[in-house]
């Protein structure tokens, strides 16, 4: 599309009040700064943290100040329709061209300690996320919208042929987060056990990655039964139902039984559950590793720090991911689509007017990974 052919406005689902139905608004399509892109959103998906943005808990909990109104959604994949000045390249090489299907990172400052010294742009202190206020330039900074503005400092990743836009959307947050976490965890050996707490999209991707990483035993802990069944299809050698084993002690005991009393080499928290952290620490073997990846909410819990010291546990936090993790996520989808049915985590499809229903479905667990299709009538 030549600049003159770009749309002048875009419909977007906007959060105007925490917890209320969203408003579909016409937002201006901004001028593209050098390095920026405009994409037509082909598919967006709902992430657990979208619910926390919408219900106000991240804002009220002081975790992330949110300046309403904001365009909802931060998992999306789209087609390039407008390119700002300059020659743009993809992470992994190749020129950005109109008509390409892409996903993209958040914006970063590029010079702060985390961006430039430790090379962790996901921890940039001046990060530009999607879901910022939409009354100021560049307005279209969210996924639940016909068009989305891609920040000049965002890295752009081409979606490989054969990878559905809905998968790429889910991978742009959930899968890249899991891939980044596995890098933080380090090497896993064939005689080791990985416990995955949670059987939502994050837990299921983590289960698939555990299988591919070569872990000998993969224990998925979650509910309901259809998600446990999917966890088995995606590589769990064992599943523990939190419905059948309703207490932390019962689940800790089950992991001990499955590991000959040793505990797991790696336990990964992807459930977001209030009780998961203290429980997971008890499932780790002496000298093992505990990865915290799903604790987005504002709750606090009590733990006994001596558990970490006496067992010599490495406790590792991981949030989001950097350019390479998006690239690897796309690669993972392309390479492994015959082994894992990625469509199986996607649930119902909603238009922009129905985003509130999709978010409520996530909240009450009737939805696993709903799709938002901004072009649905
Ligand atoms: Zn997310
Ligand atoms: Zn920075």
Image (tube, rainbow, N blue to C red):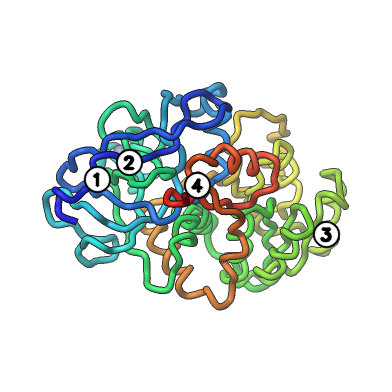
Residue at image point 57% right, 37% down: 356
In this view, which residue lies farthest toward the bottom?
338
Per the image, label 4 sits on a secondary structure element best described as: loop
In this rendered view, identify the residue nearer to me: 252 or 335. Answer: 335
What is the CA distance from the residue labelled 2 to the residue labelled 4? 14 Å
- N-term-proximal mark, 2 vs 4: 2
Horizontal relation, residue 317 to residue 30: left or right? right
What is the CA distance from the residue labelled 4 to the residue labelled 1? 19 Å
Q: Label 3: which residue? A: 261
Residue at image point 29% right, 44% down: 149
In this rendered view, identify the residue nearer to me: 65 or 314. Answer: 65
Horizontal relation, residue 204 to residue 372: left or right? right
- N-term-proximal mark, 3 vs 1: 1
User: CB under 8 Å between callouts 4 and 1?
Assistant: no
Q: Label 1: which residue? A: 7
User: CB under 8 Å between callouts 2 and 1?
Assistant: yes
Judged by depth in the image, the label closer to the viewer, 4 or 3, is 4
Quick one: label 1, few (<14), some, or many (20+) residues within 10 Å? few
- N-term-proximal mark, 3 vs 2: 2
State the mark number for residue 127.
Answer: none
Judged by depth in the image, the label closer to the viewer, 3 or 2, is 2
- N-term-proximal mark, 4 vs 1: 1
Horizontal relation, residue 7 to residue 129: left or right? left
Asked if ligand 1 lies within 8 A of label 2, the reply is no
Where residue 61 appears, as percent x and y from the top left, is 56, 24
Q: Decide if residue 348 is in sight here.
A: yes
Residue at image point 24% right, 49% down: 37
Q: Label 2: which residue? A: 10
State the mark number for residue 351.
Answer: 4
Against 250, is 208 above or below? below
Residue at image point 54% right, 46% down: 47
Quick one: label 4, few (<14), some, or many (20+) residues within 10 Å? some
């Amino acid at each position: 599309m030549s600049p003159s052919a770009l749309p002048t406005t875009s419909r977007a689902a906007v959060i105007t009040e925490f917890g209320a139905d969203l408003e579909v608004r016409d937002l201006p399509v901004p001028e593209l700064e050098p390095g920026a892109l405009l994409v037509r959103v082909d598919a967006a998906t709902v992430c657990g943290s979208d619910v926390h943005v919408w219900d106000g808990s991240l804002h009220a909990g002081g975790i992330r100040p949110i300046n309403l109104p904001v365009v909802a959604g931060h998992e999306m994949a789209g087609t390039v329709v407008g390119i700002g000045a300059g020659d743009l390249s993809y992470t992994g090489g190749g020129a950005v061209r109109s008509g390409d299907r892409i996903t993209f990172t958040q914006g970063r400052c590029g010079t702060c300690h985390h961006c430039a010294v430790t090379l962790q742009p996901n921890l940039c202190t001046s990060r530009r996320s999607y879901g910022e206020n939409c009354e100021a330039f560049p307005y279209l900074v969210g996924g639940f919208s016909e068009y989305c503005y891609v920040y000049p400092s965002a890295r752009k990743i081409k979606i490989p042929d054969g990878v559905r836009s809905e998968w790429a959307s889910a991978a742009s947050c959930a899968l890249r987060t899991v891939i980044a976490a596995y890098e933080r965890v380090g090497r896993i050996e064939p005689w080791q056990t990985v416990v995955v707490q949670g059987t939502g999209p994050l837990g299921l991707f983590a289960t698939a990655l555990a299988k591919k990483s070569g872990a000998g035993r993969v224990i998925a802990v979650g509910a309901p039964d259809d998600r446990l069944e999917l966890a088995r299809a995606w590589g769990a050698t064992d599943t523990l139902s939190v419905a059948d084993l309703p207490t932390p002690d019962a689940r800790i005991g089950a992991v001990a039984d499955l590991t000959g009393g040793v505990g797991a080499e790696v336990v990964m928290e992807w459930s977001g559950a209030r009780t998961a952290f203290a429980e997971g620490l008890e499932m780790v073997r002496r000298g093992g590793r505990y990865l915290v990846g799903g604790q987005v909410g504002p709750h606090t819990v009590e733990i006994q720090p001596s558990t970490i010291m006496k067992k010599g546990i490495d406790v590792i936090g991981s949030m989001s991911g950097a350019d390479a993790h998006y690239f690897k996520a796309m690669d993972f989808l392309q390479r492994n689509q015959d082994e894992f049915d990625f469509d199986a985590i996607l649930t119902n499809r909603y238009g922009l007017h129905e985003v509130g229903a999709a978010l409520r479905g996530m909240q009450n667990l009737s939805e696993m990974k709903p799709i938002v299709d901004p072009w649905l009538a």
